[in-house]
Image: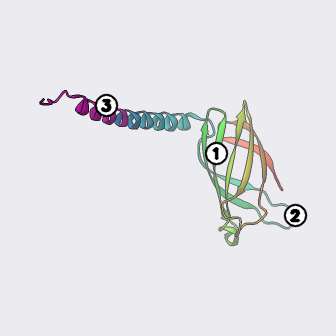
Amino acid sequence: MRRGPTSPIVVGRIGVLERVVGAVVVLLIQEIIARLRARKGVVSGEWEQIVPQQNSEAEKHDHVVCRHIGNKISGHITRLLPHELKFKRWRFEGQMRVSLVFLTFWPVDAAKNPGSYGTIRLHMIDEKQLQGFYVKL
């Protein structure tokens, strides 16, 4: 018996290939949707944050990269000033509820920045300004 292009073996292989291609397309569409949502989040983006001088510590400047999807917020912080603290970097995750932001932060490298864990609470004054405080644990 001779098998043609529509034999069960050929159809089975095409079915597997179609499923793999379909899965890849679904994953790409999900990533595109996630990126579009991230851009629409009110606090998505990059900015400089200033930590005012406290006691004998100098004012600190940080670069913040934030991703905001739905209520979830995540990102990282890199210390810019003072120069001797430029090695410090943190990750953060949290949520936004109406105009309040609640975050937990931790060091990217605990060996270089041990004990730098804590929480951040911010209130959105407007779309370009957040004010609040952090508690270092």
Q: Looking at the image, which residue is at 72% across and 37% down?
A: 124
Q: Are marks 1 and 3 in contact (CB under 8 Å)?
A: no
Q: Nearer the viewer, mark 3 or mark 2?
A: 3
Q: Position of residue 3 (x, y in %)?
A: 15, 30
Check the image and report above or below for 4 versus 85.
above
Q: Looking at the image, which residue is at 48% across and 33% down?
A: 33
What is the three-letter code of the residue carrying label 3?
A: Gly
Q: Are marks 2 and 1 in contact (CB under 8 Å)?
A: no
Q: Looking at the image, which residue is at 71% across and 65% down?
A: 110
> How many angstroms separate mark 2 from mark 1 (CA)?
30 Å
Near mark 1 (Cα within 10 A), the count class, few <14, some 14-19 or many ≥20, is some
Q: Quadrant of residue 129?
A: top right
Quarter of the figure with the N terminus: top left
Q: Earlier in the sequence, mark 1 or mark 3?
A: 3
Magenta span covers which residues? 1-20
Q: Nearer the viewer, mark 2 or mark 1?
A: 1
Q: Label 1 belongs to which residue?
A: 74
| Magenta run includes residue 14 | yes
Q: Quadrant of residue 82?
A: bottom right
Q: Label 3 belongs to which residue?
A: 15
What is the three-letter code of the residue carrying label 2?
A: Asn
Q: Mark 3: which secondary structure?
A: helix
Q: Looking at the image, which residue is at 65% across and 37% down?
A: 72
Q: Position of residue 105 (x, y in %)?
A: 73, 52
Q: Label 2 belongs to which residue?
A: 55
